[in-house]
Amino acid sequence: MRHFGHLAPDIRKALFHEEPVEFTADSPARTLAAALGATLYSPATRPRLAADVLKQAGRGVVSMVLCLEDSIGDADVAAGEENLVRQLGLLDAAAEAGADLPLLFVRVREPDQIRDLVGRLGPAVRRLSGFVLPKFTEERGTPFLEELAAAESACGRRLFAMPVLESPQLLHLESRAATLRGIARAVGAHRDRVLALRLGVTDFCSAYGLRRAPDMTAYDVQIVASVIADVVNVLGRADGSGFTVTGPVWEYFRLHQRMFKPQLRRTPFVGEAEELRNALIEHDMDGLLREIELDRANGLEGKTCIHPSHVAPVHALSVVSHEEFSDAGDILRPEQGDGGVLRSAYTNKMNEVKPHRAWAERTLLRAAAFGVAREDVGFVELLTASLPPA
């Protein structure tokens, strides 16, 4: 699989200075963590779940979570498990016939579901990349990680964990520091198994009866922004001790692609970018676009998505610009190993080798996953090309 792999080769050539690289579910964890992108959630109870997964894969989705937790009712868990096992069997058959699948994860409720589901899946477990672990703290999360290790040994397949940080203990100021230290111990003990940490911002808001409006980002809700900052501070460090932390869910999907697509399609890959951006803003994308950019500015990568219309904007804004790629390459040139200061090739900024090295390394990881845009290609052109047919 590869990002933007659903586009025709000539369109990719027109968009990219360097195209995204191909990867598989067996690629190194660092590659997969950088490539998660827009992780699309779907309730495990959907009757046509397998068909939905194949459809979204054909539209550029590379990671999905099949959810047995908050997205379904308590009374529907058993039926959801049965449907999940059945639908993954269908996906296994489709993959054997040559279909491309995204990275697939299952969000469970309790630790013992992990080994139970792995056993029930049989050969179809090879289509599973891992499990999403809800309301993760050291006390609650450690049994999940131990069950995952046991399931991995039982099936002989690498299975990743994606803990969700969403508990009240993490939100409340008096318990936050201790909770973060505990989470760091738990995930540190299973470092090779933890692919990424996900933020449950909806649960954070719920604890105080809050809900951000569609024109506001998570960073406008100060109590949420403070938690994000502390999570990145403790768990997202660039010194080798940190983990990939993904962006929070965007709740709104009043976006109607068919309404603005004619405006986007009029001038693909050429000017009038401001007019096209205005068309997007008019259709409730402004908050989402600002939040994606703020995610990256605050150390988060990728995003949890609950609607397919969010996927293309997340991926379009994940592509590395030609300017970023140029700066990162200059900073990481071998001859700059001793440090120093360089003028950007774009002559608009200072590149200081030692302080900017971690940024440059992270940027080149993203460039491999999402590609590098041509000098004259921006977000609007990437989004235009990525939208599914009308």
Image (tube, grey):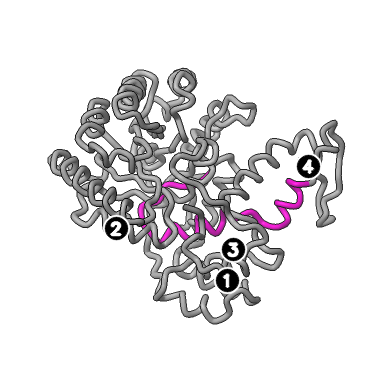
Is 328 a magenta residue?
yes
* Residue farthest bottom in this picture: 266
Judged from the image, the secondary structure of the residue bearing numbered disc 1 is helix
Circle nearer the N terminus (4, 1): 1
Residue under the image location 82 percent in, 55 percent down: 348
Residue under the image location 44 percent in, 28 percent down: 193
| Residue for badge 3 | 379
Where is residue 267 shown, x and y percent of the image?
A: 58, 79
Circle nearer the N terminus (4, 2): 2
Disc assigned to residue 331:
4
| Label 2: how many Cα within 10 Å (few below 14, some 14–19, many 20+) | few
| Nearer to the camera, 61 or 298 | 61
| Nearer to the camera, 190 or 70 | 190
| Label 1: how many Cα within 10 Å (few below 14, some 14–19, many 20+) | few
Instruction: Determine whether label 3 and label 1 are within 8 Å by CB.
Output: no
Circle nearer the N terminus (4, 3): 4
Where is residue 1 shown, x and y percent of the image?
A: 47, 52
Quarter of the view holding residue 130: top left
Disc assigned to residue 10:
1
| Residue for badge 2 | 52
Residue under the image location 35 percent in, 18 percent down: 139
Q: Which residues are magenta?
A: 301-329
Relative placement, left or right, of 346 versus 197 is: right
Q: Nearer the viewer's eye, disc 4 or disc 1?
A: 1
Estimate the spatial distance between the alpha carbons at disc 1 and disc 2, rounded to whole Å: 27 Å
Circle nearer the N terminus (3, 2): 2
